[in-house]
Image (cartoon, helix red, strand yellow):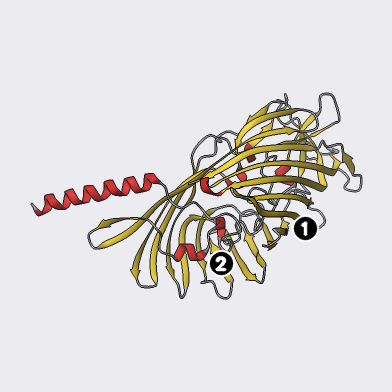
């Protein structure tokens, strides 16, 4: 009889838990509100007790929470020769859902887990321009993806150790922004678009994408062992390692008088891809006026296919704007931005017409440059955890290289002193969307 009563009580508890989870949970913090750890989660959030329903098993207690967001947008684009439109999942802050749980081992020591899944159908950074002018989608884009899957042992005194599929220490260190939540230094919309050359009619398409020459030197998630220190006087130090990659990052945030500041800098060494880079960002906002400035920058040293002069690639980005609550619904953010990305993908071969049956290697790149500028507006609706946004993006490239001479069969060769500038087309994009969190 006691066993039957226990089973009944357990079933009732699980039913109550299911109702509570379905009813919703606190939304993710906006970028700028928790900036000291990756994916916009503060280390304190990892260590704090979650406000959740409890699931009991024997004498153990594990909290459980479901969270997520949907971020869909209409992308209108023009690559200098053709134009199109597509409904996309906005890669700036992708659609996702996740589960987090936490249990207290003893006072001050907790064990927790996170499983997070992306639902990008398709991702805005995987849309590309096909040779016939239509918009294409990269193979495998329309499927669920594991975004994070790791466990953490954390102490408020010594920090947290995380193991599993997660962000390295330097992830998102270039997108710290106390103003805009939906725009930053990375290339989110034309990443997979191929650059076209006005050398013939119709324009020739190349195998070179905007993401290859407008790189923001960001990090990719992977299987890492990661350590985060406690936050000490506003500072958080993080380090991560796996079999091929190691990195370290320092983040800082401070409030003083009427200002808030947040920033971070990091170093990564990737042995498997033969590169090392340094990158970071910072943001300052004056709360009474809403005026803010955000900057980002980085350099990359990488091995290339063709031996050439050692000139590291680099980028910088700046955004100026105002983020203030003029209406009762929530904050309104208006901004303009500018960025320069230089010498990414140099000393690499350039092919033309790669989507035909006869791709041709034209030559070797010696200089690449992308200048971008744009503007946007965001309107928050706090009661619905929603942001509506509209953006305009303009990218102009400069591509320089030297042609092959094919003195030897299948060997490009060429004279590095005889360079030419290729007539690459610009890219324009207009984005209209909404992000809803739960």
Eyeballing the image, is 318 above or below 82? below
Where is residue 308 drawn, in percent x and y?
81, 53
Q: Nearer the viewer, residue 377 or 430?
A: 377
Q: Nearer the viewer, residue 97 or 343?
A: 97
Residue tagged 1: 312
Query: Which of pointers 2 and 1 lies earlier in the amino acid sequence?
Result: 2
Closer to viewer: mark 2 or mark 1:
2
Residue tagged 2: 238
Report crowding for label 2: few under 14, some 14 to 19, many 20 or more residues within 10 A (C-alpha): many
Report crowding for label 1: few under 14, some 14 to 19, many 20 or more residues within 10 A (C-alpha): some
Q: Nearer the viewer, residue 108 or 324?
A: 324
Q: Residue at x 60, y 63 (%)?
A: 247
Figure quadrant of residue 206? top right
Q: Nearer the viewer, residue 47 or 370?
A: 47
Structural distance between the alpha carbons of marks 2 and 1? 25 Å
Q: Is residue 217 visible?
A: no
User: Disc 2 on helix, strand or loop?
Assistant: strand
Q: Is residue 30 visible?
A: yes
The answer to whether 12 appears left or right of 30 in the picture is: left
Eyeballing the image, is 386 above or below 156? above
User: Disc 1 on helix, strand or loop?
Assistant: loop
Where is residue 95 drawn, in percent x and y?
53, 42
Figure quadrant of residue 83? top right
Pointers 2 and 1 in contact (C-beta within 8 Å)? no
Eyeballing the image, is 231 above or below 315? below
The answer to whether 419 appears left or right of 66 in the picture is: right
Q: Residue at x 33, y 59 (%)?
A: 62
């Amino acid at each position: 009889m006691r066993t039957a009563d226990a089973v009944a009580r357990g079933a009732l508890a699980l039913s109550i838990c299911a109702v509570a989870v379905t009813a919703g949970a606190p939304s993710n913090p906006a970028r700028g509100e928790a900036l000291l750890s990756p994916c916009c989660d503060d280390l304190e959030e990892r260590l704090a007790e979650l406000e959740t329903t409890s699931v009991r098993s024997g004498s153990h207690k594990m909290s459980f929470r479901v969270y997520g967001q949907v971020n869909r947008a209409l992308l209108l684009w023009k690559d200098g020769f053709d134009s199109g439109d597509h409904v996309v999942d906005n890669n700036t802050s992708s659609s996702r859902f996740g589960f987090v749980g936490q249990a207290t081992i003893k006072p001050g020591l907790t064990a927790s887990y996170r499983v997070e899944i992306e639902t990008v159908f398709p991702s805005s950074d995987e849309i590309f321009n096909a040779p016939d002018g239509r918009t294409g989608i990269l193979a495998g884009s329309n499927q669920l993806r594991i975004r994070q899957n790791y466990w953490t042992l954390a102490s408020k005194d010594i920090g947290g150790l995380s193991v599993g599929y997660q962000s390295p220490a330097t992830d998102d260190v270039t997108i710290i922004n106390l103003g805009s939540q939906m725009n930053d230094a990375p290339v989110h919309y034309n990443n997979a678009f191929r650059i076209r050359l006005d050398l013939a009619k119709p324009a020739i398409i190349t195998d070179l994408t905007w993401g290859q020459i407008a790189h923001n030197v960001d990090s990719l998630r992977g299987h890492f062992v990661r350590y985060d220190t406690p936050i000490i006087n506003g500072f958080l130090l993080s380090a991560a390692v796996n079999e091929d990659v190691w990195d370290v990052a320092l983040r800082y945030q401070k409030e003083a008088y009427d200002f808030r500041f947040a920033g971070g800098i990091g170093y990564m060494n990737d042995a498997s891809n033969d590169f090392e880079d340094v990158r970071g960002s910072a943001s300052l906002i004056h709360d009474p006026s809403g005026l803010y400035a955000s900057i980002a920058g980085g350099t990359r040293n990488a091995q290339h296919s063709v031996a050439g002069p050692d000139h590291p690639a680099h980028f910088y980005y700046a955004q100026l704007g105002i983020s203030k609550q003029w209406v009762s619904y929530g904050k309104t953010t208006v901004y303009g931005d500018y960025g320069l990305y230089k010498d990414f993908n140099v000393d690499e071969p350039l092919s033309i017409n790669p989507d035909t049956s006869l791709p041709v290697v034209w030559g070797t790149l010696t200089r690449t440059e992308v200048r971008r500028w744009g503007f946007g507006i965001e309107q928050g609706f706090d009661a619905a955890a929603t942001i509506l946004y509209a953006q305009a993006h303009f990218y102009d490239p400069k591509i320089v290289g030297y042609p092959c001479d094919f003195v030897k069969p299948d060997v490009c060769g060429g004279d590095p002193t005889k360079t030419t500038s290729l007539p690459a087309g610009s890219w324009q994009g207009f984005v209209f969307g909404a992000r809803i969190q739960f």
